[in-house]
Image: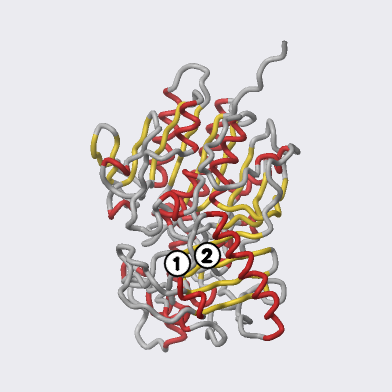
Amino acid sequence: MSEAPRRPNIVIILTDDHASQAISTYGSLVNRTPRIDEIAERGVRFESCFATNALCSPSRASILTGTYSHINGVTTLVTPLDAGQPTFISELKAAGYRTAMVGKWHMGEGERSIPQGFDYWDILIGSGGQGEYWDPLFLSAEGEHVVEGYATDRITEMAMRWADAQEGEDPRCVLIWHKAPHRPWQPHPRHAGLYAGAVPVPETFTDDYATRSSSVRRARLRLADNLNLDDLKESPPEGLGYEESALWKYQRFMEDYLRCVEAVDENVGRVIDWLTERGDVEDTLLMYASDQGFFLGEHGWFDKRFMFEESLRMPMVLSYPRRVAPGTVHEGIVTNVDVAQSLLAAAGVPSPARMQGRSFWADLTDGEPEEPPATGMYYRYWEHDDAFHQAPAHYGYRTERHKLIYYYNDGLGLPGTGAFTYPGEWELYDLLEDPAELNNVAHDPRYAAVRADLAERMRAEQDRLGDVPHPSEASS
């Protein structure tokens, strides 16, 4: 009788706000990330992976639970996770995995929201759950404690230390979830001087939003206007005009951002080297991803939230040499909601019926998919006009070529959202003809049939997922 195949160890490295355009395997023009690239070289790069709600807490909740925001309850930064609901962690643990979580959790406070299903957990709780870069405050089952040093380094070390202490043959699942490169971008001194004065400016940096909705123009995401002294660490030199000051701020922001990414890449390398030394590389599913994308000066913006490509697109690379061929590129549409079911499939563990994603595991291993490839993806950003960013609530549907967005501009009574409601507005982009998303063709008669088709497909997807269109859509 042949032996049952060895179940993989699983290591998930997740960062916050790491844009794919700052990863060299995705063609970065601003930096190099050789150790993240190494995962892609040994396995697969996902070319069309998207967040279904481009905000830290909601995306992390969707990754864990395999459900959309309106199902798992984490729609905004202030709507907490009920950690007792099924997650890929709870299912792996029930199947015999040993499980650990170290780093940024940021899905609410209180007993209901602390990590569950983990044999060991130690999470950042300072700065409202965001965590600090230096000497971060953690919470574990034993209580609060400060860990001296640089968070990106320490989170990696704590996770590896736990795994090294485990005995026996049970497979492990370890989540190494970083704060970096999240605002306010505090790099380690060992990276001082990197990228100084040498970061190229995106072609759309001076976008005037001429064809865009008022909803887009209203957002406070402009590098020139909305970065503060905590972000920049120093004021612009005196005497600069508006455009010169904007370019100075861009350069200052990008230097620190990319230096934080440098520490992330180094620590990815530490994990790879550690797995190699243990002899575990062949039998470990190692994934690197960010919880969503990030604007790095495109359209003159920083931050995320919008359904534009730089925010929507998640970098994700995965290696598992025992099962996944090296140098693979997965071109099909996948989302953060698909991750939980895919990891469970890789471990041979059934997924709960409530999970809403599509497992992409068979796509990587020449298996027979349970569902056909996705032809589109649904997005919804719930947090309306928060005090800092004033990004509008909206939902939309993206296919390989087109993207339809409806800004319904209403917080629907969600906590932390603004009191003002604006009229609903539509945007439509042809990603083949206009990959930079500069030309809104929602009201162009040539695209009337495309808009109608996308709207119909979006409503069908809302119905399938159990989400409800905003009432204003019918009259817009």
Asked if residue 249 lies left or right of residue 211, the reply is left
- Corner quadrant of residue 22: bottom right
Q: In the image, which disc is placed on residue 353?
A: none
User: Mark 1 highlights which residue?
Assistant: 303
* Residue drawn 28% across the image and 54% down it: 128
* Position of 244 relative to 154 (above/below): below
Total labels drawn:
2
Q: Nearer the viewer, residue 330 or 413?
A: 413
Asked if residue 433 lies left or right of residue 13, the reply is right
* Residue drawn 44% across the image and 30% down it: 99
- The 10 Å Cα crowd at callout 1, few under 14, some 14 to 19, many 20 or more, is many
Q: Position of residue 363 (x, y in %)?
A: 71, 43
Q: Nearer the viewer, residue 463 or 273?
A: 463
Q: Position of residue 228 (x, y in %)?
A: 33, 72
* Residue drawn 28% across the image and 33% down it: 141
- Is label 1 in contact with label 2 (beta carbons under 8 Å)? yes
Q: Position of residue 154 (x, y in %)?
A: 38, 41
Q: Amino acid at mark 1?
A: Asp
Q: Position of residue 88 (x, y in %)?
A: 50, 37
* Position of 471 relative to 328 (above/below): below
Helix, strand, or loop for circle 2?
helix
Sequence-wise first label, 1 or 2: 1
Asked if residue 57 lies left or right of residue 465, the reply is left
The chosen color scheme is secondary structure
User: Mark 2 highlights which residue?
Assistant: 311
Q: Amino acid at mark 2?
A: Ser
Q: Nearer the viewer, residue 210 or 368?
A: 368
- Corner quadrant of residue 222: bottom left
* Position of 174 relative to 187 (above/below): above
**Quadrant of the drawing holding the N terminus:** top right
Helix, strand, or loop for circle 1?
strand
